[in-house]
């Protein structure tokens, strides 16, 4: 993450986001450090922060230009992991009210995806372990670091990525159902799963085993999800805005093609 990682267990980069001025924020770490770094557009290293042990699994940029990262803190409680979110200004200063450690949803938990809503509210999604059965959990955190809501979804085993439409409203979580061995997308709001969307709040993606990336065009419009396909290679699917129809899917019949990890739309599409 920093210009010269050292030691026997250096940090791994996990996610990237671009600020309006072109600076690049990168999240990463390992179980020994939660790490966030910033680089200039020419690749010059600007700063890095390692606020606690754990790992930063996702990074996003708020409408105000701050950098948010989500992951977990390594701890003796919560099965060894406590879901965590932190926020920094573009200069690397810790934002007021952060970091935030979300109360253990069950025996253990970690955030895997994060997004910022138009008003600056942070939405983080991850996986909680309920005995041996994982399920998605989603937390909403205000711009001042207050956890305003946390909701769960047993129909989705792993919450791997979050998309927040620029118009507000529901957020979309990419993940999977390990019982059905199938990728899916779930729609949440602060009241919980939006059962009016998809099929009782969830849209299955038959082309995939697990979805780990998601984005949505403004409106909301088309929802794109990508991840590990049923052929053990990459897949991408396009859902309509109501979650009731898959517009198209593409998978590989060859396991030599890469697994898709994330998706993106241009800024012009999102407006």
Image (cartoon, rainbow, N blue to C red):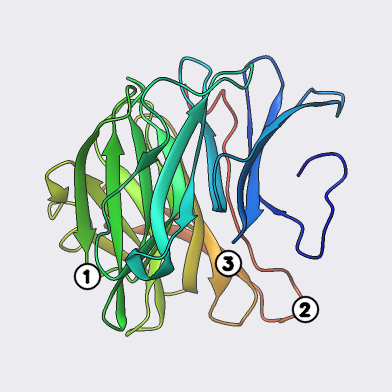
Q: Secondary structure at mark 3?
A: strand
Residue under the image location 58 percent in, 67 percent down: 235
- Nearer the observer: mark 1 or 2; the answer is 1
Mark 1 nearby-residue class (10 Å; few <14, some 14–19, many ≥20): some
Residue 29 point in image, percent of width and height:
65, 53
Residue 209 point in image, percent of width and height:
48, 76
Mark 2 nearby-residue class (10 Å; few <14, some 14–19, many ≥20): few
- Numbered mark located on residue 256 in the image: 2
Q: Is residue 241 left or right of residue 252?
A: left
- Numbered mark located on residue 154 in the image: 1
- Numbered mark located on residue 235 in the image: 3
Q: Quadrant of residue 185?
A: bottom left
Q: Nearer the viewer, residue 39 or 96?
A: 96
Q: Nearer the viewer, residue 55 or 14?
A: 55
Please tell me which of labels 1 and 2 falls first in the chain.
1
Please tell me which of labels 2 and 3 falls first in the chain.
3
Q: Is residue 131 left or right of residue 231?
A: left
């Amino acid at each position: 993450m920093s210009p010269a990682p050292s030691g026997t267990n250096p940090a791994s980069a996990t996610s990237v986001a671009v600020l309006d001025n072109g600076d690049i924020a990168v999240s990463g770490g390992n179980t020994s450090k939660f790490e966030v770094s910033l680089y200039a557009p020419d690749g010059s290293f600007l700063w890095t922060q390692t606020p606690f042990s754990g790992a930063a699994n996702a990074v996003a940029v708020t409408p105000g230009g701050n950098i948010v990262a989500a992951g977990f803190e390594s701890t003796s409680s919560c099965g060894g992991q406590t879901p965590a979110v932190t926020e920094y200004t573009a200069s690397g200063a810790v934002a007021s009210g952060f970091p935030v450690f979300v109360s253990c949803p069950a025996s253990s938990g970690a955030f895997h995806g994060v997004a910022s809503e138009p008003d600056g509210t942070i939405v983080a999604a991850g996986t909680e372990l309920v005995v041996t059965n994982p399920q998605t959990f989603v937390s909403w955190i205000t711009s001042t670091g207050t956890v305003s809501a946390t909701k769960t979804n047993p129909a989705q085993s792993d919450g791997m990525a979050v998309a927040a439409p620029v118009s507000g409203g529901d957020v979309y979580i990419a993940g999977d159902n390990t019982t059905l061995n199938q990728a899916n997308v779930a729609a949440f709001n602060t009241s919980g799963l939006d059962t009016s969307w998809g099929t009782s709040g969830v849209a299955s993606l038959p082309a995939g085993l697990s979805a780990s990336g998601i984005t949505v065009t403004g409106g909301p419009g088309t929802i794109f999800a990508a991840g590990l396909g049923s052929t053990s290679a990459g897949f991408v699917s396009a859902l309509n805005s109501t979650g009731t129809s898959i517009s198209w899917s593409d998978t590989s019949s060859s396991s030599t093609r890469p697994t898709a990890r994330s998706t993106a739309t241009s800024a012009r599409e999102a407006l």
